[in-house]
Amino acid sequence: MPSSASTPERTLRRLDWTIVRRLDGLLQGDYRTIFRGQGLDLADIREYVPGDDVRNIDWNVTARLDLPHVREYLEDREITAHFLLDLSPSVDFGTASALKRDLLVDFVGVVARLLTGHGNRVGAILYGKKVEKVVPARGGRMQVLRLIDELQRRPRLESSPATSLAELIETALRTFKRRSLVFIISDFFTMPGWEKPLGLLARRHETLAIRLTDPRERELPDIGFVIMTDSETGEALHIDTHDGRFRKRFAEVVEKRERALGAAFLRAGVDTLELSTEEDLVRSVVRFAATRKLRKARQRAMGKAS
């Protein structure tokens, strides 16, 4: 578990030794196709204009829209990635081996290290009580250290207004001009209204949702009377966990939320990587990578069959 006294340099060295090297070996350099669902080259599809190379016409889109469209490509060697970071009070919760904030810092450090180590650029938008900072995308090791430093220096909030992921995503829509790789890192405890902006973001950018979880958010143990505190508002409630009816209602609310989140990500066309405070980060990423590659292979096979 990360130490609160860790410097960015120490944190990055820890990540290099304990996570980055393991991931690089397990992924065998294939991190880019894992994160980029449409492959590295494709940047966008737009309407054909005179002078475009006819070899770049996308005939499927042209037939569907009855108007010529061409594919635009980015060079293989550079990806611009952005982290949309939810640092609201609820991410400072954790009952297993770490806080959700620890997962966030480690994931950002690891992915930023992997991407910049292969010549790519990374940036971030930080959200606490509101959108508080935009870190422009840059490359190199110093940029990774800057991101880690920004996260470690940011104080934990005792309370805040209700989180608005819509505000965070809408800031990204206004800020990112070129097609990018976007990671939304949050526990997704948020005000309503974020689903539509997420769908817009996913249409413009390769978007992945990184969901931070803790086992106690899904299962309430039978341990008697406890005080439960809303990490966003600070409101405290006295709860009798011996009450079977209460635990049943809790489970029903959790299940309803799980279904709603799953449906929202599916509608937006966004893949989800879940990071739990009780699971090894490497294991979570490798499982996600395997699932994503298998699905893309099936999609290619179905495309060839049709």
Image (cartoon, rainbow, N blue to C red):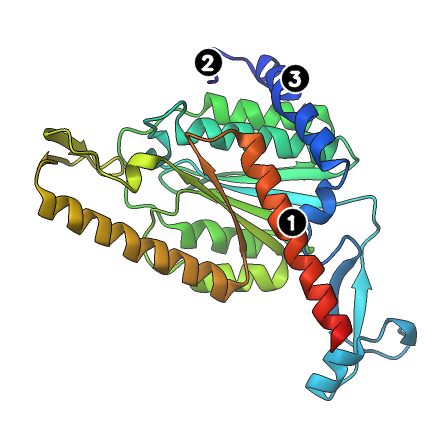
Please name the amino acid that badge 2 sits on.
Ser
Front disc: 2 or 3 = 3
Label for residue 181? 1
**Classed neighbour count for the residue bearing mark 3: other residues with Cα under 10 Å, few (<14), some (14–19), many (≥20):** few
Residue 67 in which image quadrant: bottom right
Residue at 80% x, 75% y is 58
Badge 1 or badge 3: first in the primary sequence: 3
Badge 2 or badge 3: first in the primary sequence: 2
**Classed neighbour count for the residue bearing mark 2: other residues with Cα under 10 Å, few (<14), some (14–19), many (≥20):** few
Tally of numbered discs:
3
Q: Is residue 53 visible?
A: no
The answer to whether the residue labelled 1 contacts the one labelled 3, judged by CB atoms less than 8 Å apart, is: no
Q: Is residue 114 visible?
A: yes
- x, y percentage for residue 83? 56, 41
Left/right placement of residue 294 relative to residue 68 reads left
Residue at 62% x, 62% y is 204
Badge 1 or badge 2: first in the primary sequence: 2
- Read off the residue under disc 2: 3
- Read off the residue under disc 3: 17
CA distance for labels 1 and 2: 30 Å
Please name the amino acid that badge 1 sits on.
Leu
Q: Is residue 274 above or below residue 177?
A: above
Secondary structure at numbered mark 2: loop
Secondary structure at numbered mark 3: helix
